[in-house]
Amino acid sequence: MNEQSLQAANDFLRVASETAGPGEFLERAPTDIGRDAGLPNPLAVARAVRALAARRRLEAVDGRYRLLEGRPLEAGEPESVPRAPRRRKPRKRAATRAEAAPGDRRASYSDLGRAVVERVIELGREAGEAIASSEHLRRELKENKAARIEAEQRAARLFERSKELQHKLEMAEGNLRTVLAAARGRGATAAPTDNEMETLLRILKSPASSGDAEAEPSGVPASESPGE
């Protein structure tokens, strides 16, 4: 018992001794006596009454208290009446859980929380895999798009090149027809001159050049006959 509890018990005993003698019942309620003794609340009154009863100052008889002795309590005074041991309730629930089979055990909040955490972890793993797959597909799509753009550009360049070559081929064909027409004007049996051969080779090598001046051999008029 600490000093504060000892002082409260002695104050209660002092006020009770003023209204009743040794061996007499207390005429007033313990709460009223405790209020006069300056105890702050009913809990403090109950502690003081229990301390006095344990040290043979008060005695409980049929719901009333009898004053046995008015001598104040001393510091360190042991209890004269031992406390009754508290009865422990049998752990029926624990025994039932121990005897119950694992399959018959009811689900608890811990099981629910564990299942939720495991499911969240599984969903997080699946989400991570899905994000990685989407990033891989996006990267492949970007690479394929770049390759497609490059292929389209190459196809456009090749198409322009083919058009250019076709145009040059048409020009070369026209120049060749012009030279052959000039050669026919001299006669079918007349052989072309050296100048005509050089002009023909130059036209074939450079199809971009055109004109009647190149078609006719230099120094030989187009109307000149082979026999002249």
Image (cartoon, rainbow, N blue to C red):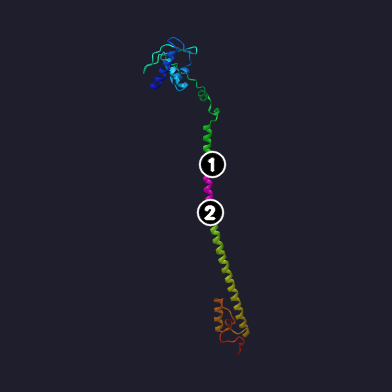
* Number of numbered discs on residues: 2
In terms of sequence position, does the residue under pointer 2 or pointer 1 come before the other?
A: 1
For marks 2 and 1, give the one nearer the viewer: 1
Q: Find numbered disc 2 in the image and state the secondary structure of the residue it sits on.
A: helix
The outermost residue toward the bottom is 228
Observer-nearest of 99 and 40? 40
Observer-nearest of 119 and 68? 68
Horizontal arrangement in the rendering, residue 93 relative to residue 5 (left or right):
right
Residue 95 in the image: state x and y as whole percent.
Answer: 51, 23
Instruction: Count residues near mark 2 (Cα–Cα under 10 Å), then give few for <14, some for 14-19, many for 20+.
Output: few
Q: Main secondary structure of the magenta part?
A: helix
Report the span colored magenta.
127-140
Above or below, 102 against 117 in this view is above
Q: Residue at x 56, y 62 (%)?
A: 152
Could you give the CA–CA distance between mark 2 and mark 1, rounded to whole angstroms?
A: 26 Å
The mark found on residue 140 in the picture is 2
Three-letter residue code for mark 1: Leu
Instruction: Count residues near mark 1 (Cα–Cα under 10 Å), then give few for <14, some for 14-19, many for 20+.
Output: few
Q: Residue at x 53, y 47 (%)?
A: 131
Q: Quadrant of residue 153?
A: bottom right
Three-letter residue code for mark 2: Glu
